[in-house]
Image: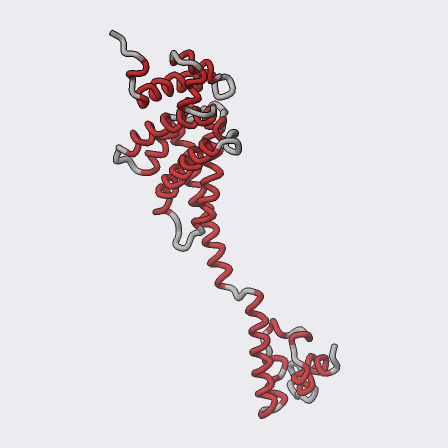
Amino acid sequence: MPRNRQQIPKAERESALLAQARELFTAKGYRGTRVAEVGRAAGIASAAVHWYFPTKDDLFAAVLERVFGEVIAEVEASDRAPRDRLEAFLSKTQRYRVLHREAYERMEESEALRALYLGLLQWLEDLLLQAISARLPEGADTDLIADTAHVLLEGMLISVRELDRPVGDLIDMVIDALVATAVAKSAARLGVERHAPSGRLSVARTRFRRHASRRLSTGSPASVCAHRLPSRFQARSCVPAPTRQRLAGCSCRVHSARSRQYAVGR
């Protein structure tokens, strides 16, 4: 004898309702599915659906949580590498990409969908970062990599374009691009550090001026002759006034003309 609906545990009734909603959302999408239609498919009134799920967004979030939760559990149960787990998840959920996009579009309207979507994206980002961590140079900007991974993965999730190549090829392209960018930025940063930044030039000028002043107090004009100045300090604005005054009497044959130029303030 069939059981009375009241005799069926709530969890079991909710599970049956989600199964019907999953079929309808997958076939018609969020916009094309009505709550009343889900209720009829499950054999209950639409008002009863709201008793389980107050809003359509809550019902949609529960369906997606079940869909993605099943795939994540299957992927995590394997001992595959992070890159392979990422490929497995994206491959198994390709048929739900339209639902990904609709969840993304409803994020601002539903806290349940927002929490679900961002939680899924964070899990995928973690997998991607695990997949590339061993190839990153020391000191790589992981925050920038994470932000870039977020954008790229989000695009892969919500794109409705029909893929004409395996998901694995796209993942490898994303990983290679992130690693190559990190390596290039790291090399550029090291190159900059090998050369004194502009701020160090001012410090060097100050040190030279102090050194020149001490030499002027005890040495001859030739001790601070212009030809002893570093090339980057040859400009008139870089030579302190006391130095120019002392250079007026310099007898250096090589740079006497330059010394006279400093002395007259050119």
Query: Which residue does the image show at 58% across and 65% down from the upper left?
Result: 198
Q: Is residue 5 visible?
A: yes
Query: Which residue does the image show at 38% across and 16% down from the upper left?
Result: 20
Residue 29, horizontal then vertical, whole percent: 48, 20
Q: Is residue 97 visible?
A: no
Residue 4, horizontal then vertical, whole percent: 30, 12
The quadrant of the rendering that contains the C terminus is bottom right
Does residue 119 sit above or below 230 in this rendering? above
Q: Is residue 172 left or right of residue 211?
A: left
The outermost residue toward the bottom is 218
Query: Which residue does the image show at 44% across and 44% down from the upper left?
Result: 146
Residue 145, horizontal then vertical, whole percent: 45, 46
Does residue 104 sit above or below 29 in this rendering? below
Q: Is residue 243 left or right of residue 142?
A: right
How many marks overall? Answer: 0
The quadrant of the rendering that contains the N terminus is top left
Query: Which residue does the image show at 44% across and 19% down from the upper left?
Result: 25
Q: Nearer the viewer, residue 183 or 220?
A: 183
Q: Nearer the viewer, residue 40 or 168?
A: 40
